[in-house]
Image: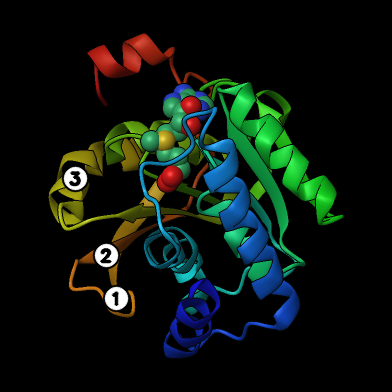
Amino acid sequence: MLEDTLREGFAAMGLASDERALARFRDYYEALEETGKIMNLTAIHGEDAVARLHFLDSCAPLTRFDLSGRRVIDVGTGAGFPGLPLKLLCPDVELTLLDSLNKRLDFLRGLCARWELDGVECVHGRAEEPGARREQFDFALSRAVARLGLLCELCLPYVRVGGTFLALKGPGAAEELDEARRAVSLLGGGDAEILDYALPGEDADHKLVVVRKLRPTPPRYPRKFAIMKKCPL
Ligand code: SAM
């Protein structure tokens, strides 16, 4: 059952969960399955897989970083990952969920309204157009949106100097980071590190790429998406 997988999983990860959070994860799961019949939300189905690969995985940054009271943006959130599970477990995160597909944000807006969550904004827009949100966040997070070099150009502009960009990645993280080192530096990032994490009941290698922001991102970045793709930094 979803609740058992989550209860045991959070405990194994050293994270506290309460009944209210578990009830909301149940509701989230049902909504993913139900709305997923009419909208493409996730390729992962079933209580155990969704609990582990979406909910527990999304909360992995909490095992290493205290996000309480922090301004956090989830870039390319899709059906809410990793931002919304983090918010359910750590309700005083100030969360922005950003995606270019408004249908998915409508799904997320519906859930946040139903749960009466404070401190969440759902923003429809392109990540490469940060506007007034530039350098406003303590943390930018992202999962399954792009390779690391391109992802840095999408995410680092949102992070304030002294803040952190976290990318949830798979076993290829080290290779992606080697490829992205120049981009990290040009965009104001400092040394990057890779933290391993495991999900309960899983053999797969999960990696958290951590990039601290040391300097403001030069105003010429981010570039237009087509240019980023054609000419990676
Ligand atoms: N992060 C979620 C996850 O881990 O399940 C969703 C991953 S999904 C494969 C990628 C999401 O990023 C999609 O919802 C897509 O609309 C969004 N996306 C891709 N490029 C984007 C951009 N330039 N600006 C905003 N959203 C973008």
- Three-letter residue code for mark 2: His
Label 3, on which residue? Answer: 176
Point out the tag, 2 or 3, that comes first from the N-terminus: 3
- Res 187 seen here: no
Mark 2, ligand 1, within 8 Å: the answer is: no
Q: Answer whether labels 2 and 1 touch (C-beta < 8 Å).
A: yes
Which quadrant of the view contains residue 124?
top right
Label 1, on which residue? Answer: 198
User: How many C-alpha atoms fall within 10 Å of the one at disc 3: few (<14), some, or many (≥20)?
Assistant: some
- Three-letter residue code for mark 3: Glu
User: How many C-alpha atoms fall within 10 Å of the one at disc 2: few (<14), some, or many (≥20)?
Assistant: many
Give the secondary structure at mark 1.
loop
Q: Looking at the rendered structure, which numbered label has been put on residue 24?
A: none
- Quarter of the figure with the C terminus: top left
Label 2, on which residue? Answer: 206
- Three-letter residue code for mark 1: Ala
Does 206 sit left or right of 226 as displayed? left
Residue 48 x/y as whole percent: 40, 68
Residue 52 x/y as whole percent: 40, 67
Q: Does 170 sit above or below residue 7?
A: above
Q: Answer whether labels 2 and 3 touch (C-beta < 8 Å).
A: no
Give the secondary structure at mark 3.
helix
Could you tell me how far apart the alpha carbons at marks 2 and 1 are, in whole angstroms? 6 Å
Taking the spot 60% from the left edge, 63% from the top edge, the residue there is: 86
Could you tell me how far apart the alpha carbons at marks 2 and 3 are, in whole angstroms? 14 Å
Mark 3 or 1, which is nearer the eye? 1
Which quadrant of the view contains residue 101?
top right
- Colour mode? rainbow
